[in-house]
Amino acid sequence: MTDCLFCKIVRGEIPSQIVFENDQMIVFKDIQPVAPFHLLAIPKRHIDNIADPNLVDGELLTGLLQGIQQVVTEMGLKENGFRVVANYGRDAGEAVHHLHFHMIAGRSLAWPPG
Ligand code: 5GP
Ligand code: ZN
């Protein structure tokens, strides 16, 4: 998608702080972090959101999950814990319509979220 914000980040047209990359996905720092660690894991290919049927693809899902597992391991996030969340729609406050998993860590995280 030419005018999608996160597609532009994937193509390097908008600067971002990428901390991990594999064939299927990138992980970069959220521009407005809500915790000491706040990363966004996104597919390189445009997927609308967590409910997009195009997400149900073995290679894509494997790449996404492998990337997330590698990041939480290499960044030491498994020691104290972390949260991975995808917002969908109005009630969840979804703002960017390219699938992204928030990876949040580095402080105590309330549950249930507000
Ligand atoms: P959502 O509310 O859609 O689940 O989350 C979108 C996230 O994208 C927000 O946490 C917001 O701070 C982040 N974000 C929006 N624009 C940019 C940007 O240009 N660069 C980066 N790194 N993060 C962004
Ligand atoms: Zn996109």
Image: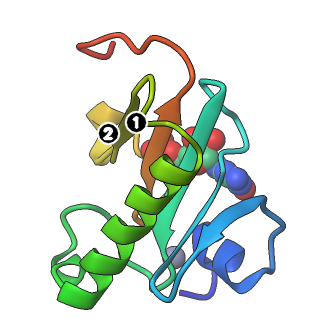
Residue 76 % position (x, y):
54, 39
Do residues under tags 1 and 2 come within 8 Å of each other at their CB atoms?
yes
Query: From the viewer's perspective, is residue 61 above or below residue 102?
Result: below
Relative to 104, does residue 88 appear above or below in the rendering?
below
Q: Residue at x 48, y 67 (%)?
A: 42
In this view, the residue in front, 70 or 42, is: 70
Expressed as whole percent of the image width and height from the top left, the position of residue 33 reads 66, 32
Is label 1 in a helix, a strand or a loop?
A: loop
Task: Give the Cα distance between marks 1 and 2.
Answer: 5 Å
Can residue 95 be seen here? The reply is: no
* Residue 59 rendering spot, x and y as whole percentages: 27, 89
**Where's the C terminus, which quadrant?**
top left
Q: Which residue is mark 1?
A: 93
**Residue drawn at (28%, 32%), measured in percent from left and top?**
91
**Quarter holding residue 81:** top left
- Residue type of the residue flagged with mark 2: Arg
Residue 35 horizontal side relative to residue 49, left or right: right
